[in-house]
Image (tube, helix red, strand yellow):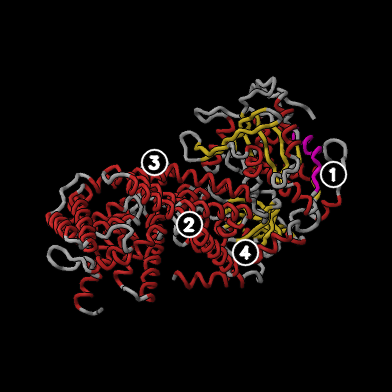
Amino acid sequence: MTRIALDVLDSPKPSVSQDLTVALVGNPNCGKTTLFNILTGLRAHTANIAGTTIEQRVGKARVDGHDLQLLDLPGMYSLSDVSPEQKIARQALMGEVPGQRGPQAVLLLLDATNIQRNLLLAGQVLEFGLPTVVALNMCDLARRSGIKINTQALADELGCPVVAISARTGEGIPELCNALTLRLSSDEPNALPESLSACATCGGCPFRARFDWAEQVDKRCARRPVGDHDPRTAAADRVLTHPVLGIASFMVITFVLFATIFWLADYPSGAIEWVFSSLGGVVADALPPGDLNNLLVDGIIGGVGGVLVFLPQICLLFFFLSLLEDTGYLARAAVVTDRLMRRVGLPGASFVPLLSAHACAIPAIMASRVIENRRDRLVTILVSPLLSCSARLPVYTMLTALLVPSQPIKAALIFVGAYSLGIAAALLVAMALNRSILKGKAAPLLIELPSYKPPNLRNAALSMLDRGRVFLVKAGTVILLVSIGLWASATYPKSAAPREAVTMQQQAEQLEASGQTDDASQLRVQAESLTAAHGLSNSLAGQVGHAIEPAIKPLGFDWRIGVGIVSSFAAREMIVSTLSIIHGVGAGDGGDEMLYESMRHAVADTGTPIYTPATCLSLLVFFVLAMQCLPTSIVARRETGTWKWPALQFVYMTLLAYSAAWVTFQVASQVFESGAVG
Amino acid sequence: MFWPSFLISPLKALAAGSAPAPCEVAEGACLIPLDKLQLGQCGLIQRLDLIDSDDKRLRTMGICPGRRIWMVRRGDPMVLKVMGTRIGLAAELAQQVTVEVCAPLYEGFDDAPATRVEREPGEPGGAGEPERPEA
């Protein structure tokens, strides 16, 4: 074996210096994340590669007393430019990404249970000539299935050190660190194997020559038993990829997943709600009444609580998705759902993000990264907010209570109808997008089905922390700012108390003087509610509500609902609390039932009821379809890289919601007027 | 026709698999599209007729001329095994891949020919001295 010095790259590394960057490169599903988490622990962060929406994780790893910068590049099968992700990974490896220094060494991770296919990438990485150390991962699983790999022979074939490890159990990690230090302290270039250098120059199909090389290397270094070396995966796949049983198992698994998430999230969410409402109460009592008190209680404490209440659900969703991904099941889910999804022009891989959208569109949009093809990913992001998220539940509950009070079966039917409308709209819009601006069809399925493995709790926990942080930083700050902004617009400009309220207060004083304190305080509360409703009506938000009234009149909405719609941009459930202020039902006294009661009896200035069945139905349709969520837009902007797509999303959803609500109101008014439905 | 075909196509997929696919005979070899491979049958990949991006996607996953590929589950999408890995593949891509049917049916669809196990690593035409694999 000859050693070929590469003069293309200069390697100035006489000793291990402090600021060395090592790139972690490997196939998808080879345990890269697990190894990265072991080496860096919590000292890692996720960042976008400059100028792209593609993420990489960077962390400090302590290797034999030296701090190394470890760069976790996206998993890839080869260095050829197939997906934008692989293109960026290759550029990062070569140091071509602007504003980011290229790595000085490569830690190449190979899957011992699947060495042949992994060697394709190994060959390409070795040709770069950066100092490389190969970690042969999953050697515990390989051993268990009877695969034997001669690491010394493999090291000779590849011309670089090879260490057998298991990132899952921690086996071989100290040896790997040793090998890495040793390799970094010498400036000797890699000895490019002769067999491989022949590959690089040969004509014809470059992959074919490389696979032939990989097969030869595999033949010389590995032995495996006759027959399938992973009978358990084969057995599980007989059920889980079955055309009928596979769909059934998928439904069961996702049902259990979401039921668990909603069930578990209830406890921390309830606790968070309780903590913030008590905190609000304490602050409200401690401070003298006034603007500062209001800002702290309604604007800041209410806003922070409103953000945090969604956090448990999002964290749990990512925790369980990471567990499922680790086991290898998500790839099977993509296979069984592909047939259904392709009919509407979406790939099977978009099923899980769209399902997550029923919890919240924000994690759904973040989870759409698993979709390789950009067109498919954009369609998925654009339709996700149409699916009914949990923030719409309070709105549906309120409207159902108005439409069919105390009729559980009819109420359940309305809920089913709202969810179905969202799903139908998402599928139809996806189809329409395929035929118009995002022409084309879903990329035909091609996905690796990795061997089933026990999930890794550490990976899941870290992924949960990471995603939770992204939600808090990116969406949380926006929700908070919008809440404060909305509070301000609902408070200012201030107006004097209405004449009735002033008279009521005077009456209360007289009653108090005559000793009737109970009646007096009742009158006071009424006066305060009236003042609050009057203040909101004259505030900026109220003025906006009045201003948009002509536009929303055809939908059956008056200015009060207009204010609710405006306020719901922070989070959809805000319309409920806004309407309670408008209708003079103070927060905390009497609860939702009192709000529904006062809404049922609410009349407009002309004396006609405001919340007629037609208006309620129209508002329900509007909330199913409208993009009433600023944080979602922010996250969509982050994931697509431009404002163009969130803007399009907002426009098409608003138009859709407006026209659908208009049709609903017109039809429903005719039906209810003619008395066909009592 | 959304639901009927959704219900029927899995049944069709189940029913398929009995009739052997007719093959185009070239120089004594039986050439068929990849999706026509029978369950458990092996094919030697001959040719890919795909647009560039799909072509690269398939090749990097090991669906590349010269590789052996096994049918693990028929249907759309089908499950194949190539280079020791299971792969889910849409029929519309598989139709554009031509394979030569290989006669032997290996146990468990493993792509390692049974004879290879008998050889010691390093022995046949390998570089360096023959070495015993690690225990």
- Spatial distance from mark 4 to mark 2, Cα to Cα? 21 Å
Query: Left of A281 or right of it: where is A199?
Result: right
Closer to us: B99 or A71: A71
Q: Amino acid at mark 1?
A: Pro
Query: Left of B86 or right of it: where is B122?
Result: right
The residue shown at (72%, 58%) is: B28
Discs 4 and 2 lie in a common subunit: yes
Q: Residues within 10 Å of mark 4 (few under 14, many from 20)?
A: many
Mark 3 or mark 2: which is in front? 2
Quick check: marks 1 and 3 in contact, CB under 8 Å? no
Quarter holding the N terminus of chain A?
A: top right
Q: Is residue A276 above or below residue A195?
A: below
Q: Quadrant of residue A68?
A: top right
Q: Secondary structure at mark 3?
A: loop
Output the chain of dot 4.
Answer: A
Across and down, in percent, residue A548 comes to 20, 53
> Is there any visible trace of residue A345 in the rendered image?
no
Q: For residue B133, which numbered disc appears in the image? A: 1
User: Mark 3 or mark 4, which is nearer the start of the sequence?
Assistant: 4
For the record, the magenta segment spans A148-160
Q: Secondary structure at mark 4?
A: helix
Q: How many marks?
A: 4
- Spatial distance from mark 3 to mark 2, Cα to Cα? 23 Å
Q: Secondary structure at mark 1?
A: loop
Quick check: marks 2 and 1 in contact, CB under 8 Å? no
